[in-house]
């Protein structure tokens, strides 16, 4: 995932310098060498394998390291294994003086984003999880195929956990300013339950076929980085620190967030129908439960 994200950043000419860090130094060097070969045919950028000290002055750091899932293993089941890896990465970065924006892509991403906030010593707004940005893209693609419109014409969000309790918020969907129901009109509506299940289970199908996911999540990483480095103030559904909004504990989960140079400038709370509100609360409760389990194992 990390090398794929670096490749996408290089093709988009997003940064002048990209450093790859891995506990397997030879792997990082090999990936960097491969990227350098590709860079000869792209826009100039300095790419190398380095250390946390090399990343100290970076504007953005992306953590992709974590436990790998196998088959139908849920993201949440990776928590204890990923926690050790992500904590080590975050501490290594921030002990070296890093104070930029930290993007977390390791699964389970909501829990790992919360751990990163705890260990980074950075303002909460400067730690962003990739969250449901990819799930939202999948939802738009599925709706586009069903409605025979371009995915770029569809607005709407998947919220909550990036995982099995995620909420496909169909009430937020807009096509040309119309709600989903108004756009469909008297035509046969798409099977929303089936669409939501397809989006939720998409990663399982990919992992079953190739062993991991890379292109989709790498593109989501790059999209977040673009919003930060260009100070776009774009609204993207990412995992953000939420202060006891969904219970008695702080938690990270995905909501639409205004993203600019400083990271998460504002968290937005969309108007949902009662069923979606209940599902989002249940998703938050599930994440809180899993975070408590993770803390107990630490």
Image (cartoon, rainbow, N blue to C red):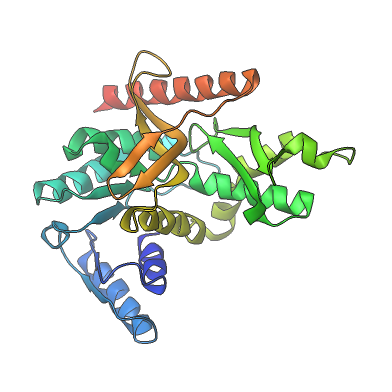
| Along the line of sight, the residue nearer the viewer: 274 or 34 | 274
Q: Image quadrant of residue 259?
A: top left
Q: Quadrant of the N terminus?
A: bottom left
Say which of 39 and 126 sits in front. 126
> Would residue 298 be seen by someone viewing this image from the given angle?
yes
Q: Residue at x 47, y 34 (%)?
A: 255
Figure quadrant of residue 273: top right
Side of 136 where 259 appears, left or right: left
Looking at the image, which is closer to me, 203 or 12? Answer: 12
Task: Give the residue displayed 26% in from the left and 55% down from the top.
Answer: 60
In the image, residue 183 lies at what x, y percent? Answer: 78, 41
| Frontmost residue, 29 versus 113 | 113
Q: Is residue 118 above or below residue 91?
A: above
| Residue displayed at 49% across by 46% down | 133
In the rendered structure, the answer to whether residue 93 lies left or right of residue 250 reads left
* Residue 81 visible within the image: no
- Whether residue 262 sits left or right of residue 159 in the image: it is left
Instruction: Residue 213: give x, y in percent of width and height.
Output: 49, 56
156 over 153 or under it: above or below = above
Residue 226: where, in percent of width, then height? 38, 58
Give the residue drawn at x 59%, y 58%: 209
> Residue 287 at what x, y percent from top left?
42, 26
């Amino acid at each position: 995932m990390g090398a794929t994200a670096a490749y996408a950043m290089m093709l988009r000419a997003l940064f002048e310098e990209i450093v790859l860090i891995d506990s397997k130094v030879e792997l990082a060097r090999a990936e960097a060498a491969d990227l350098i070969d590709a860079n000869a045919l792209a826009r100039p950028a300095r790419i190398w394998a380095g250390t946390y000290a090399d990343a100290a002055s970076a504007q953005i750091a992306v953590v992709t390291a974590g436990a790998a899932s196998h088959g139908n293993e849920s993201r949440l089941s990776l928590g204890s294994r990923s926690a050790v890896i992500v904590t080590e990465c975050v501490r290594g970065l921030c002990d070296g003086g890093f104070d930029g924006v930290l993007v977390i892509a390791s699964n389970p991403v909501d829990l790992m984003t919360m751990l990163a906030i705890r260990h980074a010593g950075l303002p909460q707004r400067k730690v962003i999880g990739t969250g449901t940005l990819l799930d939202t893209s999948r939802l738009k693609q599925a709706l586009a195929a069903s409605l025979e419109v371009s995915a770029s014409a569809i607005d709407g969000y998947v919220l909550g956990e990036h995982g099995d309790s995620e909420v496909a918020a169909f009430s937020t969907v807009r096509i040309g300013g119309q709600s989903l129901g108004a756009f469909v009109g008297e035509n046969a509506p798409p099977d929303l339950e089936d669409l939501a299940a397809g989006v939720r289970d998409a990663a399982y199908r990919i992992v079953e076929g190739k062993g991991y996911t890379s292109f989709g999540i790498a593109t989501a990483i790059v999209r977040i980085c673009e919003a930060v480095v260009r100070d776009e103030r774009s609204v993207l559904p990412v995992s953000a620190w939420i202060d006891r909004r969904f219970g008695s504990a702080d938690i990270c989960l995905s909501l639409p967030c205004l993203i600019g140079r400083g990271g998460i400038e504002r968290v937005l709370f969309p108007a949902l129908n009662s069923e979606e509100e209940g599902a989002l609360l249940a998703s938050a409760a599930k994440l809180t439960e899993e975070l408590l389990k993770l803390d107990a194992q630490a």
